[in-house]
Image (spheres, helix red, strand yellow):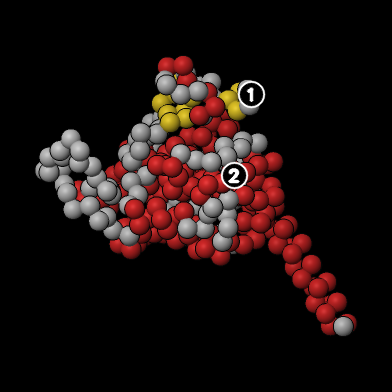
Amino acid sequence: MEVQILSCAHMSFESSINNIGLEKEANYKGNWTVLLAERAQSSATKEKFLAMKEKFPTVEERTSDHKLGMLDKFSDIPTDTFEQGKDRYDANIGHVFGSTEYVHSKDTSFQADTLGLSAGYGDPGTVFKDAALNGNQVSSEHKTIIEAHEKAHGLFRDLTNGEKTYILSPFNEENLNLRHSAKADEVLARMSQLKNYFGFREGESFTAEHLEYAKTHYVHDVGLDNRMSDFFASIEDQHKFLEVINAIPC
């Protein structure tokens, strides 16, 4: 019995030490867009990107030379798009981080609480000048978080059906509260937010301790809940979540 008590005390002490370490690591105060650029340029992230494409290739055989009929549609991303994504990884980083568009939401078909937009792979992203949540204008610091989120779409959005299934596998999809067609892409961008929150640059491992700390502190620390609460609440398989966030490029 004494051994069990000592063991519990030791575990509690270790947990406290881990939390102190995570507290210093968490709530990164630098520019999240710059941090994402550094991470995207790392050899570790590029290797993950290419490994994912190899593990989950497209099943769509048609290319741009194929003329689609009126009732014909792609079941997956086209082969030429898939190959271009692999071949242009480095060039795409330069393009995505080369600029960012800032516009008023009224000049688009979206509301201010959308925060920003991405047209997909290769798009540098758009941030709303009047971005707001719950009627409150977001800060300049928050706009760099939005900017990084939209640029994550520009870097990684052309996902195959296999990649989408894998990325969504740890979640209860109904609870994610995201558009069906963009669920996996939005999950990836939010996984990228978590890595930014902890200041990840190249090859760091996201652990169970990181996840538990983020569940408790992320929304409070960051002050911008772009459905991150839904994201955390939707995780059903923590072990699978840790596998996915460490395997995918984000």
68 sits left or right of 217 in the view: left
Image coordinates of residue 171 in percent, x first then y, are 53, 54
Task: State the residue at coordinates (41%, 26%).
Answer: 101
Marks 2/1: CA distance? 20 Å
Tell me which corner region of the image, top left, top right, bottom left or bottom right, holds residue 13.
bottom right
Residue 238 coordinates in the image, percent (x, y): 58, 61
Residue 8 location, quadrant: bottom right
Mark 2 or 1, nearer chain start: 1
Q: Which residue is drawn at 42% across and 20% down?
A: 108
Q: What residue type is labelled 1?
A: Asn
Q: What residue type is labelled 2?
A: Asp
Q: How crowded is mark 1: few (under 14 residues within 10 Å), some or many (20 or more)?
A: few
Residue 127 visible in the snapshot: yes
Tag count in the figure?
A: 2
The image shows residue 147, relative to residue 64, as above or below, that is: above
The x, y position of residue 234, in whole percent, is: 58, 51
Q: Where is residue 73 in the image (x, y as percent from the top left)?
A: 23, 42
Mark 1 highlights which residue? 136
Say which element carries label 2: helix
Q: Which of 208 and 236 is in front in this view?
A: 236
| Mark 2 burial class by Cα count in 10 Å: few <14, some 14-19, many 20+ | some
Q: Is mark 1 on a helix, strand or loop?
A: strand
User: Which numbered circle lies on residue 230?
Assistant: 2
Report which quarter residue 3 is drawn in. Answer: bottom right
Q: In this view, does 52 lie to the left or right of 20?
A: left
Depicted 100 relative to depicted 178: above or below: above
